[in-house]
Amino acid sequence: YRIFPPAVVAAFPLPVRSGFVVLNVAAVLGSAALLFALLRRYRASAGLALLLVFWWTLLPFGARYALYYPVLLDPLGFFLLLVLITCALDHQLALFTFTLVLGVLTRENLFAIVPFLWLVEMPRRGFIRATFAAFAVAIPAVIAFEAARLYPLFPPPPGFENWYERYRVDVNVRFVLENVDGSLWRYLLAAPITLGVFVAIPIAAWRAVITFLRRELAWAYYIAITLALSLAGGRDDGRYAYLLLPALAVVAVAAVQGRKWFSPRVAVLLTAIQLALMFSFRPEGPTEPEYLEYTVAFMTLDHLRVATLIAGGGVIATLLLVHRESLARLSGAVGARARRSAG
């Protein structure tokens, strides 16, 4: 049913795997440009935007994944997600409509961006006109989505129905609630393990983040719906958590831009933390067991514990960087009080 990316690859005069590599590289380059533009929209300096894009390239399910696991739809799906976000913020409804059709023929979860558009349009159009616009842009995508299922170009292969059963919402939620094979921990830890400092910075600068999300309800919705879909959509927790990236990158700009604690030295240290978090424990071998250890959803529990300790260390290191001045003042006050008591 996800027919758009294979159709593009089929148009290439290349073998299938090579065609997907070309498509993925193009999608990654386009995503980098759109992510940079998105961060600049939220008043990130050019240097800060480039730094955050560089951190993004280090993520295990970003640019690296596009080459490590090329015959997959994630890179193009992420690019189309960024196009939809950009169209929504620019009020480009016609382009949003067209991209959404391609999007739902790539990854069905892109339907979830329609309420994001509605929340962006509400202050500009009012409730009724924004609601009408959201329904109007969704209708062609709904038609395309249903047509692909009612009249598939290729019949689903034998056993596909059994595979689909794994993605039932009730089963997925039950796995998490009952913590089957550590599913609850995998769900909770997927974002910090997968995204590194993109999670650590909002935790450390949570007041700035709350202030931003109160003002930007569309982004608050985006984070909430991504977490909900990650819970309901299946067991690939890391891949689903990766989709938090656009929101967390924008939130990171709000957390660091113009703050006294953020300096070139801190940027270098945060980059070192991100490099350590993303490369210290994740194998990238060509075998199935190595791939399973690459993902939060399927790595062994012993490996998950190691990844958790490393991610926790990254969060603590980021907290110390963000609050180092406050900690220094606190330490000085405690030392002065101790000296007075001794005197």
Image (cartoon, helix red, strand yellow):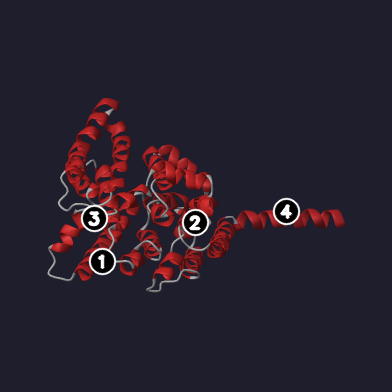
Asked if the residue at tag 1 contacts the one at tag 4, i.e. Cβ–Cβ closer than 8 Å, the answer is no
Q: Nearer the N terminus, badge 3 or badge 4?
A: 3
Identify the residue at image location x=48%, y=47%. 175
Q: Nearer the N terminus, badge 3 or badge 1?
A: 1
* Kind of residue at badge 2: Pro
Question: In the rendered image, which quarter is residue 294 located in?
Answer: bottom left
* Kind of residue at badge 3: Pro
Q: Nearer the N terminus, badge 2 or badge 4?
A: 2
Mark 4 vs mark 1, foreground winner is: 1
Which residue position is annotated with label 1?
A: 25
Q: Which mark is residue 157?
A: 3
* Kind of residue at badge 4: Ala
Find residue 160 and report its horizontal and vertical position in percent: 29, 52
- Measured in 3D between alpha carbons, the distance from the residue under mark 4 to the one under mark 1, in whole angstroms, is 53 Å
Specify the quadrant that holds the C terminus. bottom right
Which residue position is annotated with label 2?
A: 192
Which residue position is annotated with label 4?
A: 333
